[in-house]
């Protein structure tokens, strides 16, 4: 299938990128970057954050890795905590990348993972600390309540001495899907349970009040007392994501 001007430009941009890393979630956007990078004969260090992925999510990611013929690295998070808004809950995993820390937000869906089993800080540094340029699959029109109006600040930005580039910054989701089809790749959205941007946790103690039934303990326990809006505000202030 012939390449559109937009896809050809993306391949050319990736061909000129400095050596570095590529953050791959397993979603459509970052998968397009992996495919286009291969078309550009570029080999970036590909990393995926795989903390507490379900067997379904892992199977889907591993199948994509095999299909794409790529080598993917992963490493532990350095911190984790909960945020939320109204009835929404997300787990934030912080990862050390280059000489900075970036957040990986995973929206909570119904599942069996007990939030008490999601450990705290496990790694202070990154095994890829020397990589100073990272490619990400985020777009300007990405939306999340935790990052009002700006999931990413620009097409290219710096954090410390680490540079991040989002080649798909001004793309739309439909344009991404169209480019994937040009490469003969499936552009079907992952289902909720397959989507690696979600985390399948039990939320009974996080949403309840007073005594709630805990499936893990098979008994009633005290509901967790927490302020999801305050947690979200603290997260936004930490990463400069508050509304201007």
Image: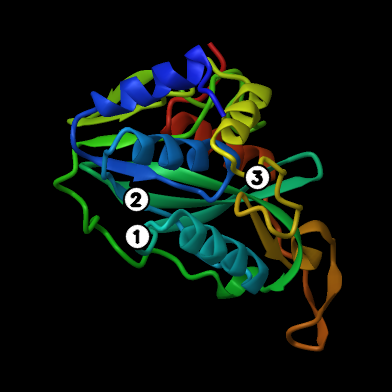
Q: Is residue 173 left or right of residue 73?
A: right
Which quadrant of the structure image shows residue 171? top right
Q: Disc 2 on helix, strand or loop?
A: strand
- Kind of element beneath mark 3: loop
Q: Which mark is residue 46?
A: 2
Residue 153 visible in this rendered orientation of the protein: no
What residue is rendered at 71% in x and 44% in y?
A: 189
Residue 186 visible to the viewer: yes
- Residue shown at 55%/67% (left/top)? 52
Dots 2 and 3: beta carbons under 8 Å? no
Residue occupying the point 43% across, 19% down: 8
Q: Is residue 227 left or right of residue 93?
A: right
Q: Tell me the mark number nearer the camera, choosing from 2 and 3.
A: 3
Q: Residues within 10 Å of mark 3 (few under 14, many from 20)?
A: few
Say whether residue 213 is left or right of residue 59. right
Q: Are marks 1 and 3 in contact (CB under 8 Å)?
A: no
Q: Quadrant of the N terminus?
A: top right
Decide if residue 136 is on the left or right side of residue 148.
left
Q: Residue at x 72, y 44 (%)?
A: 188
**Where is residue 134 drawn, in percent x and y?**
30, 36
- The residue where tag 1 is placed is 71
Residue 14: x and y, percent? 32, 28
* Real-space Cα separation, disc 2 to disc 1, in angstroms: 7 Å
Percent x, y for residue 204? 81, 66
Instruction: Label 1, secondary structure: give it.
Output: loop
Q: Which mark is residue 231?
A: none
Q: Are marks 2 and 1 in contact (CB under 8 Å)?
A: yes
Lower sequence index among marks 2 and 1: 2
Q: Residues within 10 Å of mark 2 (few under 14, many from 20)?
A: some
- Residue matched to label 3: 186
């Amino acid at each position: 299938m012939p390449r559109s001007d937009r896809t050809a430009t993306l391949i050319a941009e990736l061909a000129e990128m400095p050596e570095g890393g590529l953050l791959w979630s397993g979603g459509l956007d970052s998968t397009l970057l992996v495919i286009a990078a291969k078309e550009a004969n570029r080999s970036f260090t590909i990393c995926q954050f795989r903390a507490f992925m379900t067997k379904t999510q892992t199977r889907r990611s591993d199948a994509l890795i095999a299909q794409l013929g790529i080598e993917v690295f992963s490493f532990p998070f350095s911190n984790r905590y909960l945020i939320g808004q109204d009835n929404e809950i997300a787990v934030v995993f912080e990862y050390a990348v280059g000489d900075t820390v970036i957040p990986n937000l995973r929206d909570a869906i119904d599942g069996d993972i007990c939030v008490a089993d999601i450990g705290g800080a496990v790694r202070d540094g990154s095994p890829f600390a020397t990589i100073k340029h990272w490619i990400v699959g985020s777009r300007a029109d990405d939306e999340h309540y935790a990052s009002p109006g700006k999931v990413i600040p620009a097409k290219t930005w710096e954090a410390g001495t680490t540079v991040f580039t989002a080649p798909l910054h001004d793309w739309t989701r439909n344009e991404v899907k169209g480019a994937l089809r040009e490469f003969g790749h499936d552009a079907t959205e992952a289902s909720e349970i397959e989507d690696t941007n979600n985390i399948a946790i039990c939320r009974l103690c996080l949403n309840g009040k007073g005594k709630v039934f805990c499936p893990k303990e098979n008994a009633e326990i005290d509901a967790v007392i927490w302020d999801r809006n305050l947690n979200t505000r603290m997260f936004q202030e930490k990463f400069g994501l508050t509304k201007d």
